[in-house]
Amino acid sequence: MKQFFKTRVEWILLIAALLGHLVLLSTRMSQSAETPLLRSWTMEVAAPFLKRAVGSVTSISNLWHRYIDLRRTHEENRALKGQVEQHRRTITAYEEKIKEIGRLQVLAELENSLAFPSVRARVIGGDPTQWYHSRILDKGMEAGLTRDCAAISPDGVVGRIVQVSKRSAVLQLITDVDSGVGVLLENSRAQGVLKGEGRREAFIEYVGSNEKVVVGEKVLTSGLDQIYPKGLLVGYVVATSPAKQVFQKVDVAISADVLKLEEVLVLKKESPS
């Protein structure tokens, strides 16, 4: 019996040795001309995990590169917006300059057509309230301006100088409630005094109730106030109010847009000879 078990143990050891040898041989055997069989098995088992790991790293890398590209695109867009805004401001400045040149050219033509010495002045400020309609000009005594100089625009009379300093002056608009302009009606030749009502509205006082005033008729300066030369356009008749009294009220729309003045032509007072 002992001999039997001894023999079996020997066989088991022999088989185990053969299996071990076979395993050692398998490590040297090639599945192909280059890759050993055991290594091939290992690669087959590890490949899915390696693919996932490499895929995760690649995804993170791609995500990071997309973030960098997004930041770069955002910065480029911001820079482009800044350039567009700068170009827009430049274009606006050029457009304003062209408009200013056009206005100054019209003023120059008006200046050449007048028989009075004059000075071109720019509006640089104004009264913030609407109760007292005035504007500040950039010309003063150095340019020959004095109190009661008339100011006009290409569209008509705008006001008179009420205060003067060395390099600036205050212009009272004809729409001011305290202003007064001697006027006459173009067709009827009726005369009166224009009083301001604010904005671009005014009315004429002291027009006889028997005078025939026509809506749309031109209102011109009469020259009797010794401030505005005769014959300058002031506005147009828009309505009349017949009165039972001696005078009628004549409503006038001022021809010049006095609330949007940017440049004016100031007529100098002629020195007494």
Image (cartoon, rainbow, N blue to C red):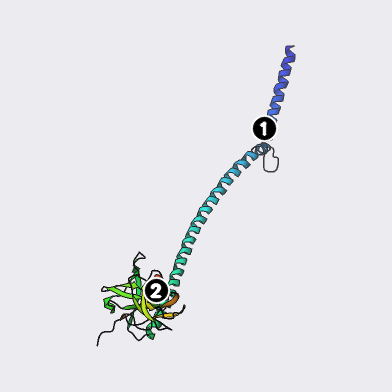
Question: Which of these two is toward me, 23 or 179?
Answer: 179
Residue 184 occupies quadrant: bottom left
269 lies above or below 96: below
Mark in the foreground, 2 or 1 = 2
Image spot of residue 27 (x, y percent): 67, 35
Which mark is first along the chain, 1 or 2?
1
Label 2 crowd bin: few (<14), some (14–19), many (20+), radius 10 Å:
many
Q: Secondary structure at mark 1?
A: helix
For residue 132, side relative to residue 44 (left or right) = left
Q: What is the residue that sits farthest to the top in this orientation?
A: 1
Q: Which residue sits at x=75%, y=14%?
A: 4
Quadrant including the N terminus: top right
Q: Quadrant of residue 212?
A: bottom left
Q: Which residue is mark 1?
A: 24
Q: Is residue 95 visible?
A: yes
**Vertical placement of 76 versus 205: above or below?**
above
Q: Name the quadrant of the C terminus.
A: bottom left
Q: How far from the left and from the top, in percent, is residue 62?
A: 57, 49
